[in-house]
Image: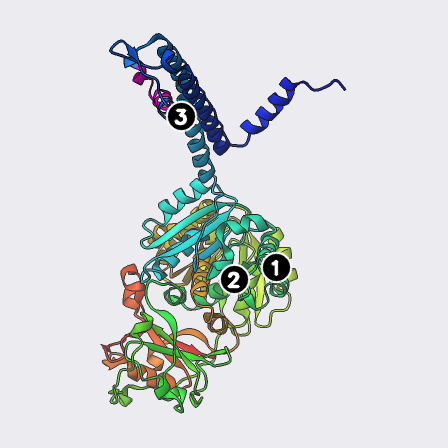
Amino acid sequence: MKDVTFAQRFRYWFDNYMSKGTAALIGGVGGFSLVVILFAGLVITIGGSLLGPESDGARTPLSFPEAAWQALMRTLDAGTMGGDEGSGYRLVMFAVTLGGVFIVSTLIGVLTSGVESKLDELRKGRSRIIESGHTVILGWSSQVFEIVSELVAANENQRQSCVAILSNEDKIEMEEQIRERVGDTKKTRIVCRTGSPIDLSDLEIISPHTAKSIIILAPETDDADTQTIKAILAITNNPNRRVEPYHIIAEIRDPENLEAARLVGKTEAELVLVDELVSRVTAQTCRQSGLSVIYTELLDFGGDEIYFKEEPSLVGKTFGEAMFVYDDSALMGLYFGDGKAALNPPMDTIIQAGDKLAVISEDDDTIRLSGITDYKINKNAIRQASSPKPLPERTLILNWNRRGTNIIKELDNYVASGSLVTVVSETEEVEAEITSECGELKNQTVVFKPGDTTSRRMLDSLDVSSYNHIITLGGDQMGDQESDACTLVTLLHLRDISDKAGHHFSIVSEMLDVRNRALAEVTRADDFIVSDKLVSLMMSQLSENKALAPVFQDLFDPEGSELYLKPVGDYVALGTPVNFYTVLESARLRNELAIGYRLRADAGNPAKSYGVAVNPTKSAIVTFSEADRIIVLAEQ
């Protein structure tokens, strides 16, 4: 190998130095400027009277500091040398000015390049955030907009709050979509960063160790649960993890992956089983129109929510006695000192010290004891419970997705023996899936028919008027907008068939995009299940209050008490003005808990929550008609 020359070594050093970035370049320019200024000052000082400036025909020797200062001024401003006199002095200052032109132009170029580079870096969303007590969202899906909207509503009473989002999406695109879909975020700052939620170094960008809660969204891929479990693992087993437990909320789609997620998350992760939740609500709602509106009211931050309140004055009293203590809040259960919850517990349950009441109220500061002692209960209006024999039901499911089998299984828990489910789908493989997944039904038989659910001829051949309930599902093989468009066409046909036949049947539809619900309301379907919104609302609530987990688990569990809409005539006399205390007492006599009602006259009015009134003022007078329903927590 030939000997390396000095020129080659210098070139190698120079290349390495130039690659160090803006700070190094500015330092290099500054160093070169200093050399030029000091050299010029030294030359003028040594030159004495020969190189000093000329004034009135005489040369003035300059000291070194003064000579360096004059050189500095000419380096920064080329016009400064315009008044210089003396040939030697002018020659030196001309050389300094030429060097200054090079130095200043280079500095401007370096600064411009550095600023552009920094802006590009910020646009990439790779800078670390410094936040504490913020909410972290890992991943990106259509649910993020609803979650951010709910968190903004939840944080309205706080002086400032922050939501940090980390996903593989482009930072600028995320911010633009949030501005478009969410709008004004009020006091909540939304910070987006680009990175992988399962990469340990990328996780540090959004400061998860100082967050109050972490929401993990499942990616819209086939291995969604695997990615979710990896994200949980990246947080709980992080080398930099904090001592205090994390508060993680994650969604799991396949029940078979639930146990693995629990092993990873332990007590630090609250897991939402998405498909099971949506399937259960769909099955319940198709039999009870308006139920999804009630769930939405309880889960969003826009109206009444579930809070916990300890009332020392009620210690020693029974749950049945405590039901009447609030006039503008509704009791729905107990949250025990051991962290367990019970909705509609036995009426003789004694409230112990440390127990909290699970209360539906507008806000936590609106939970106030009314002090009312005379509830003005109209005992003459109370009706005795009746138990009619349940009849077999016919359910029609139009279109198919991965939640179809779960819906059929959930329906089997509620319908009478001898019931029928008919499934219609263009995908013939669905029949084999139903046979393998729904082979052990107790109360239903399932029939499959191939066909296009948007075809009017196909729908007419089904004799839809013979069915009690109709469910339309979104397709797995289509995008959200295409699927909702097909659902809308199907609903229009169904409503036309109903109008021409003069026969009403319950229609419940699954919408994938909440924005399409407004369009679909023209079909006058009885209810809509917006699956992503329902899951998003629950995750938002859990992120703000971990104690709600056992309440939601009890609320959506087929065992124990659930929400039902029952005929008002079973509770109070029709056409008789009564207050809600009377309804509450009637429900208490049959070990049920009334939390609201639905007025059929307002069922088509979105401004009045489709007739649903959760947590009505109990002292207010209302007159019910035959088609109205009472919302109760009951075992059946």
Residue 323 magenta-drawn? no
From the viewer's perspective, is residue 565 above or below residue 494? below
Mark 2 and mark 3 lie on one chain; the one further toward the N terminus is 3
Residue holding disc 3: 108
Which secondary structure lies at badge 3?
helix
Q: Residue 63's x, y, as percent?
A: 37, 23
How crowded pointer 3 is (Cα within 10 Å; few <14, some 14-19, many 20+) is rated as: few
**Which residue is more in the foreground, 159 or 28?**
28
Q: CA distance from mark 1 to mark 3?
A: 47 Å
Q: Main secondary structure of the magenta part?
A: helix
Q: Amino acid at mark 1?
A: Asn
Point out the frontmost of discs 2 and 3. Answer: 3
Is there a contact, CB below 8 Å, between mark 1 and mark 3? no
Whichever of callouts 1 and 2 sits on the residue coming sooner in the sequence is: 1
Please say whether residue 555 is visible from this viewpoint: yes
Residue 468 visible within the image: no
Q: Which mark is residue 452?
A: none
Dot 1: element: loop
Q: How is the image coloured?
A: rainbow
Q: Residue under label 1, please give it.
A: 237
Q: Estimate the spatial distance between the alpha carbons at disc 1 and disc 2, rounded to whole Å.
A: 13 Å
Region rendered in magenta: 70-81
- In the image: residue 264, left or right of residue 148: right
Image quadrant holding the N terminus, namely top right
> Dot 1: within a 10 Å radius of its alpha carbon, few (fewer than 14), some, or many (20 or more) residues?
few
Who is closer to the viewer here, 18 or 67?
67
Amino acid type of the residue that numbered disc 3 sits on in the rendered structure? Ile
Q: Mark 2 highlights which residue?
A: 248
Q: Earlier in the sequence, mark 1 or mark 3?
A: 3
